[in-house]
Amino acid sequence: MALSKKQGIAVGVIAAALVAVVGVGVTIGLYRPADAVAAADPTATTGANPDTGEIPRITGEAVPEAVAALKASGFTPIEPGKLTVAIGAFVPPLSYQPEGTTAATDVAGTEPNFGELIAEGLGLEYNPVVVAWADWPLGIQSGKYDLITSNVTVTEERKELYDFASYRQDLLGFYVRSDSPISKIEEADDISGLKIVVGSGTNQEKVLLKWNEELTAAGKAPAELNYYDDNAAATLALQSGRVDATFGPNATAAWAARETGETKLVGIIPGGWPLAADIAAATKKGNGLIEPVSIVLNAYIADGTYAKVLDAWGLESEGVDKSEINPPGLPKS
């Protein structure tokens, strides 16, 4: 199935973006009901549709408890009445600039949608700013941005400088051709003898190397790791049968599987394997914003708005039951 023109997902752009995302692994990235006041009657656009090109934007309304908490927190937005949110414009389903648009408010995907919902829940105007990955830490620290929602993984080192409110699991996924006989890849034995595409220097490569060590020690054939400089070549290798599987960030692979129908998920493991970590909204530590943000997220989890975002972009597997403030993060390296 061809990708829809309206979504503006040019193959070359996706390839370049995926190389950038995979290259940094889980460093970028990337669920329990709470007693929060539910947002009133949120509405949603039509879900993502590969055939019609519909671009989903799930909307909500102010959450009274969060608005009150924000007022009591002492937090002052950079721009009065607005929440300035740092977002990326990298690759669907996380964030991308649809074809024919240039404004930051048009950037689509799960990450900007969560940023917009948080602003609405706080009773503030959504003010997105497209930011390069390398620039957000200083931007948050210096007060240039109030918040970031851009596939940021919680780490113990980052928690020293930022406060977090979780909203997705950081997961890695194994994908194979839709007609592949492979049905499960969950542990070392499952990759024995397989040819697997993986990004060099990523956490997923570390996982495969560790599993290969286990296989070799047990006298079993290790997996053959294959490295490609662009996603188009890797996709061609999978579809032609030159490799058996791909292993990388689940979000982008899940979207590709949904859009094309040419691949299927056969295994998911935590992004920080063997440890688990969450993707979270981040703000400057101690500024008072994170509690109201978490209240908003939990209200949307409780009333179903949150699930609509994940469902619209095919990321139901990455959902959480509850937004937690400063959850356990990946340890310092």
Image (tube, grey):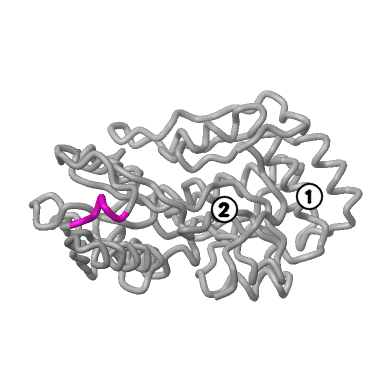
Q: Upstream in the sequence, badge 1 or badge 2?
A: 2
Q: What residue sits 31% from the left and 38% below the top?
A: 258
User: Is 248 left, or right, of 84 in this rendering?
Assistant: left
Judging depth in this view, the residue of 29 and 308 nearest the camera is 29
Q: State the extent of the magenta-drawn residues as a range.
A: 188-192
Q: Amino acid at mark 1?
A: Glu
Q: Residue at x 66, y 59 (%)?
A: 282
**Could you say which disc has been placed on residue 291 in the image?**
1
> Which of the pair 110/62 is nearer the observer?
110
Q: Secondary structure at mark 1?
A: helix
**Label disc, if present, on residue 278 of the rendered structure:** 2
Q: Confirm whether residue 263 shows in the render.
A: yes
Residue 222 or residue 146, whichever sits in front: 222
Relative height, residue 91 to residue 136 (above, below):
above
Q: Where is the C terminus found, in terms of image quarters?
A: bottom right
Q: Residue 163 in the image: x percent, y percent? A: 72, 61
User: Residue 121 lies in what quarter of the image?
Assistant: top right
Q: Residue 119 — which label?
A: none
Q: Position of residue 28 (x, y in %)?
A: 50, 64
Kindly report the distance in space between the C-alpha atoms of the residues bearing marks 1 and 2.
Answer: 17 Å
